[in-house]
Image (cartoon, coloured by chain):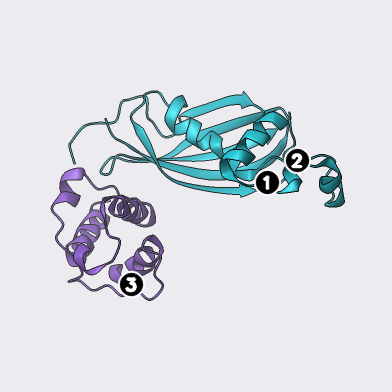
């Protein structure tokens, strides 16, 4: 299972939408309810699922799901 | 989001607990506030007909201790409740001597998030288990 496939159920759970689809180009504007609190829940869920920690600086730079995937891959390589 | 550090007191494993109980009078107040006037919480005969010796405490009145945790019992007053999940495993009765226990399970420094595992005990009985999440916002 690749990273984006593992991210999908996390997004579906956080945004309570079983039909949600994400791609590398998905941004917060594309998903209803992706506000600041949902973003926190999403980041915490990703950190727990992948057993990694982000810094505030790292997540503030993310522009889309693809960049999040790249960051997760980088973090997992460095564990 | 700023780059502040959590106060050092917030470490995974932080353990907080306190004793508490709810009286029938407390339950009446909660019924009035929540508009949950179900007889299971006030009428002994009705409660007996459902298999309980006395009225049972509202589950969400028990959950109120999660609000107390985030609002009152943490080392500082900078946290805001963002989520709760609670399972009610056994009934709770008026004036039961209870203990609320919280253990800080997860800290996310990037989002200033805290997640606690919680339980409510009556002696050795685990009445409730759950999770509380909050953000630390100085």
Contact check, label 2 and label 1, Cβ < 8 Å: yes
Residue A56: percent from left, percent from top: 20, 44
Q: Are marks 3 and 1 in contact (CB under 8 Å)?
A: no
Mark 3: give few (<14), some (14-19) or many (20+) Cα within 10 Å: few
Tag 1 residue: B37
Which chain is purple in the picture?
A
Residue A70 drawn above or below residue B79: below
Rendered position, B9 above or below A66: above
Residue found at x 44% / y 33%: B70
Q: Are discs 2 and 1 located on one and the same chain? A: yes
Q: Evaluate whether label 3 is on the same chain as label 1.
A: no
Q: Nearer the viewer, residue A79 or A37?
A: A37
Neighbour tally class for label 1: few under 14, some 14-19, many 20 plus, Cα within 10 Å: some
Residue at 33% across / 29% down in the picture?
A: B78
Q: Position of residue B32 (x, y in %)?
A: 61, 39
Establish if A69 lies above or below A43: below
Q: Position of residue A12 (x, y in %)?
A: 38, 67
Density class for disc 2 (Cα within 10 Å; few <14, some 14-19, many ≥20) is: many
Q: Disc 2 or 1, which lies upstream in sequence?
A: 1
């Amino acid at each position: 299972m690749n990273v984006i496939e593992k991210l999908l159920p996390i997004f579906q759970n956080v945004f309570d939408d079983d039909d949600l689809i994400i791609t590398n180009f998905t941004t917060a504007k594309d998903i209803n309810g992706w506000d600041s609190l949902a973003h926190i829940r999403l980041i915490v869920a990703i950190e727990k699922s992948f057993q990694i920690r982000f810094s505030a600086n790292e997540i503030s730079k993310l522009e889309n799901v693809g960049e999040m995937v790249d960051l997760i891959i980088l973090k997992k390589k460095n564990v | 989001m700023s780059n502040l550090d959590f106060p050092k007191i917030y470490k995974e494993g932080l353990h907080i607990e306190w004793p508490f109980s709810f009286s029938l009078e407390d339950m009446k107040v909660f019924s009035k506030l929540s508009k949950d006037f179900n007889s299971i919480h006030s009428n002994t005969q009705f409660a007996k007909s459902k298999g309980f010796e006395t009225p049972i405490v509202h589950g969400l009145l028990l959950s109120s201790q999660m609000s107390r945790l985030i609002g009152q019992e943490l080392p500082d007053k900078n946290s805001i409740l963002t989520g709760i999940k609670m399972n009610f495993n056994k009934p709770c009765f008026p004036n039961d001597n209870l203990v609320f226990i919280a253990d800080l399970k997860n800290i996310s420094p990037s989002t200033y998030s805290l997640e606690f595992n919680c339980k409510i005990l009556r002696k050795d009985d685990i009445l409730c288990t759950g999770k509380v999440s909050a953000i630390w916002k100085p």
